[in-house]
């Protein structure tokens, strides 16, 4: 008897569901019949025409950092997710400049107007000897690595200058923590003990003494930070190794946000900024491409390596920051520059 009741109950439930579906189908049919095509507005496709008068004034900002030119990444050590050597490094840097040029041309076609480029060199161009193991695993010594990466960077910047579209190429140049000549980081005299600071000065000399490249301007840091006022927006550039990440659910963005709050208090205390805080911080070091409210963190050229693997960091494809700073709207289009092919 109980079994019969259960069957009857189930049949009623299914019948109710079917009736609901029938009602839904009837409603759809009635709606379709009520539509009269002849009463609708013109259904022709939209005609989009370019407006040559529309010129949005912007400054493209891009970062190049964490190349680690002489560090080798062996596939077997990183679960086959990456491979890196001198040939791969050269190829990725060349792709960075060629794809940057492509993006610059595309945004000009889209109606953006610009005559200035900001190219932030934010350090760790070389891996150096800051850890004992690197003395046996690096493919080049620090001086050799500097000469190798310097040649690639000079050729890339020359290509940008020769495009003839920039009145000014600003290059904020920050030494990283890997380029130091000392075992421990130095805070006051760090730049004086940096292979990269030496390299930036040599690059500056090359461009200043070579005719035809007077639109290239290096701004070489003698501290951990550089400030740039662009369209009235306050930008701070730094390598990014000045705060620590000790784990946690929020990831690296938590200490990043704490750091930017502290830096805002420093900036507003400076009379030169008229009580204004930092509009955007540009950092590197963490090998993570992050777009946050007031922070742009760069990826890396080297990509996933044995250090990241040993600490269980999330693998990330090699990519660099590319950002448009709009004169009226602030920080708008952000698009990564990928350094690998699919």
Image (cartoon, rainbow, N blue to C red):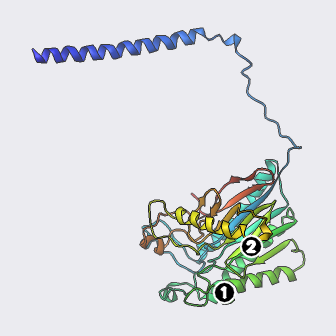
Q: Is residue 159 visible?
A: no
Tell me the quarter of the picture where residue 217 sits. Answer: bottom right
Residue 317 versus residue 183: which sits nearer the camera? 183
Could you tell which of marks 2 and 1 lies nearer the N-terminus?
Answer: 2
* Left or right of 138 on screen, residue 233: right
Q: Return the residue nearer the eye: 182 or 232.
A: 232
Gap between marks 2 and 1, in whole Å? 19 Å
Counting other residues with Cα less than 10 Å from the Cα at mark 2, is it few (<14), some (14-19), or many (20 or more)? many
* Residue bearing mark 1: 188
The vertical placement of 45 against 113, above or below, is above
Residue 339 image offset from top left, x and y in percent: 62, 64
Q: Where is residue 91 in the image (x, y as percent from the top left)?
A: 64, 70
In the image: residue 298, left or right of residue 207: left
Between 245 and 10, the residue placed more toward the observer is 245
The image position of residue 327, as x and y in percent, is 81, 54
Q: Are marks 2 and 1 in contact (CB under 8 Å)?
A: no
Query: Would you name the residue on which mark 2 appears?
Result: 172
């Amino acid at each position: 008897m109980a079994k019969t009741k259960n069957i009857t109950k189930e049949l009623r439930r299914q019948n109710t569901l079917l009736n609901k579906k029938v009602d839904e189908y009837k409603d759809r049919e009635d709606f379709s019949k009520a539509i009269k095509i002849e009463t609708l507005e013109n259904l022709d496709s939209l005609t989009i025409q370019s407006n040559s008068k529309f010129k949005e004034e912007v400054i493209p900002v891009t970062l190049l950092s964490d190349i680690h030119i002489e560090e080798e990444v062996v596939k077997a050590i990183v679960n086959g997710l990456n491979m890196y050597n001198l040939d791969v490094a050269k190829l990725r840097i060349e792709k960075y400049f060629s794809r940057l040029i492509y993006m610059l041309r595309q945004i000009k076609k889209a109606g953006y107007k610009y005559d200035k480029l900001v190219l932030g060199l934010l350090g760790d161009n070389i891996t150096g000897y800051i850890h004992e193991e690197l003395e046996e695993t690096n493919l080049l010594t620090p001086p050799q690595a500097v000469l190798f990466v310097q040649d690639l960077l000079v050729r890339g910047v020359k290509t940008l200058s020769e495009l003839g579209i920039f009145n000014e190429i600003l290059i904020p140049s920050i030494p990283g923590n890997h380029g130091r000549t000392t075992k421990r980081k130095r805070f006051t005299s760090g730049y004086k003990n940096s292979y990269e600071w030496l390299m930036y000065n040599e690059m500056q000399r090359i461009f200043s003494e070579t005719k035809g490249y007077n639109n290239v301007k290096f701004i070489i840091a003698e501290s951990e930070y550089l400030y740039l006022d662009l369209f009235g927006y306050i930008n701070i550039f730094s390598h990014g190794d000045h705060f620590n990440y000790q784990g946690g659910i929020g990831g690296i963005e938590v200490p990043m946000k704490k750091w930017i709050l502290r830096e805002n208090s420093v900036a507003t205390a400076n009379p030169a900024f008229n009580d204004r805080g930092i509009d955007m911080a540009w950092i590197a070091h963490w090998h993570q491409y992050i777009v946050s409210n007031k922070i742009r963190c760069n990826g890396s050229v080297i990509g996933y390596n044995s250090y990241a693997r040993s600490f269980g960091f999330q693998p990330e494809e090699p990519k660099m920051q590319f950002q448009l700073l709009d004169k009226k709207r602030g920080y708008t289009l952000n698009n990564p520059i990928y350094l690998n092919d699919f």
